[in-house]
Image (tube, rainbow, N blue to C red):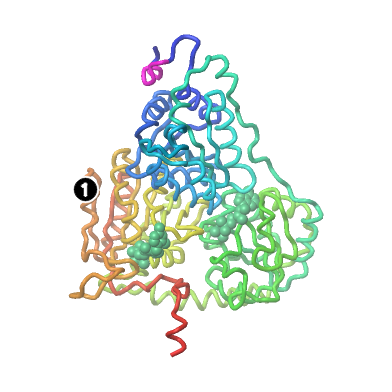
Amino acid sequence: MSAAEEFTGNVQGAMTDGFHLVIEALKLNGIDTIYGVAGIPITDLLRLAQAEGIRYFGFRHEQSAGNAAAIAGFLTQHPGICMTVSAPGFLNGLVALANATTNCFPMVLISGSSDRAIVDLEQGDYEEMDQLAVARPHCKAAYRVNRPQDIGIGVARAIRAALSGRPGGVYLDLTAEVLGSALDAETGRKSLIKVVDPAPPQPPAQQAVKRALELLGKAERPLAIIGKGAAYARAEAEIRQFLETTGMPFLPMSMAKGLLPDDHPQSAAAARSYAIGNADVVLVAGARLNWLLSHGRAPLWNPNARLVQVDIASTEFDSNRAVAAPVAGDIKSAFAAFNAALKPGQIKRQAAWADEIGKRKQQNIERMAARLNADPSPMNFSSALRAARNALATQPDVYIVNEGANTLDFGRNIIDMDKPRHRLDSGTWGVMGIGMGYAVGAAAVTGKPVVAIEGDSAFGFSGMELETICRYDLPVTTVVFNNNGVYRGDPEGRPYSPTGLLRDARYEKLIEAFGGRGYHCTDTPSLTAALSEALASKKPALINAVIDPTAGTESGHIQSLNPKSAAAQKK
Ligand code: ADP
Ligand code: TPW
């Protein structure tokens, strides 16, 4: 018996079983890493995976395992795999699956499930739940395998569904019975499927390309908005060529920062409102006109602007306002087609527009500079982020994870990105809890250092994964922006409010419990020094950055989304 066979014990001669078929199907499809939490009925499956050479990262909570899988999918264009136990473990992972789907990241949540005969009659099995039905509304596709000979097809369908077209999360339900079932080894081997070309190029129609270029050619104030779909698609070379040839100003969405470097002269980021409000033709590529772009509507947007939109999902066009020139296709092919079809001088650099944006940028940067260069005691968000930025300035390889409210909003603006796909954040839902999962996933698939810049509340959602980071000795530095609360701390001497957190918590001691390095920083020089030292060490570290408890703004930059009482306004 091989080491792998030992774990399931029942594989004899010409027979195989569900455990082996699942692992073989995953390996056949290039899966080399699994993120999960062990327990009935998947413990032996995880042991077998490890014995068969798959890397396994065991987490303290399934949500973080799922988040790690999701970000691995975003970073590699191959689905991240998360494995969980039934019912509660599955539900814990489901938030990550739904978040991956919302953000268009490819992942597969594979959960073991209890005895179908008992579950379907609601007879009260251990961890009973109709997981397939629960998962279905929260993901792109959901499948259950009920027979060992269908494992190959189940895994193939899950991988293809996660990657094809608009990527997303897929649920794959494996019953305990299927895992343990025996099958003739030859039949089993023949049932496996290697997925061929799950995400083929989808070039747009020539007519769509022509229409888009003609509209952009008429623009006096064109603007490109580049989203994380373009980052996922690895379209940076094609986009850069198009933008630099046409001289068009651009705005990156937060996870598209670095697709072109933030210090690129055509970046309009420091004049965002002016650029969006005054553009007459906007090219939106790999971004949805959702709340993050004010739904494409006034007052932020010029209501008379005409839109070109590039997206792999045609249902995105006209979702919030009319799109005059839809370009259905994958972004890489679409921009390659733009570059090929663009006639010399067809879209000219609009000097007056570029100069006006340049002037506004300069004004805003100067206005920001005073706040950014101030060194108050205690630190505030700007000064602490400046201190972090100073340590990061010479480290373009570092992956940044960022969540919180103020920590996120200030972080997005202050930490410049130089490389594509190096900024990973709360994304489309503005969700808290991605921090440590994304950090582990990013470190696992890139082998590069990760700095997670976390609000103190945000950090708490996944903080126990510090143990995971230390167990695998990952080069992850967590910086907790500690202002004693959700958004901000409570005034001294008052009881804890709904947004209050423990005053002066010593988060750095958490990581010391697991053998990591903790730092307590109350000023900017010590924060820069600690982050530099932690990065140089390539070891797990946590920096407790003490921020003025009065510094935060309620809800960060999206305070307007808090419902207001209509009754109070009528008084
Ligand atoms: P952001 O949050 O950066 O604004 P969104 O997540 O809202 O970005 O939008 C990403 C968009 O990118 C989605 O509409 C998705 O369909 C699209 N997309 C994802 N992958 C590709 C691809 N390879 N080619 C074209 N569009 C893509
Ligand atoms: C899953 C609501 C949005 S931002 C935030 C919460 C709880 C934390 C803000 O405080 P933090 O950051 O992290 O200390 P800062 O920089 O302002 O001090 N539950 C989920 N997601 C969200 N978005 C919330 C709650 C929320």
Q: Quadrant of the C terminus?
A: bottom left
Residue closest to the eye, 205 or 111 = 111
Find out whether residue 6 is within the magenta segment: yes
At horizontal 54% and vertical 28% (from top left) the residue drawn is 151
Residue 362 image position (x, y, % from top left): 52, 75
Where 434 sits versus 73, above or below? below
Where 155 sits versus 365, above or below? above
Residue 76 image position (x, y, % from top left): 53, 42
At horizontal 32% and vertical 46% (from top left) the residue drawn is 465
Q: Report the magenta residues as a range.
A: 3-10
Where 510 sits versus 253, above or below? above
- The prevailing secondary structure element of the residues shown in magenta is helix
Whether residue 463 sits left or right of residue 346 in the image: it is left
Are there few (<14), some (14-19), or many (20+) residues within 10 Å of tag 1?
Answer: some
User: In this view of the protein, can residue 404 be seen by the observer?
Assistant: no
Quarter of the rendering containing residue 55 = top left
Q: Quadrant of the N terminus?
A: top left
Judging by the rendered image, the residue that carries numbered circle 1 is: 512
Q: Quadrant of ligand 1?
A: bottom right
Find out whether residue 201 is within the magenta segment: no
Whether residue 328 sits left or right of residue 167 in the image: it is right
Residue closest to the eye, 42 or 367 = 42
Furthest-left residue in view? Answer: 493
Residue closest to the eye, 303 or 45 = 45
Amino acid type, label 1 = Glu
Q: Secondary structure at mark 1?
A: helix
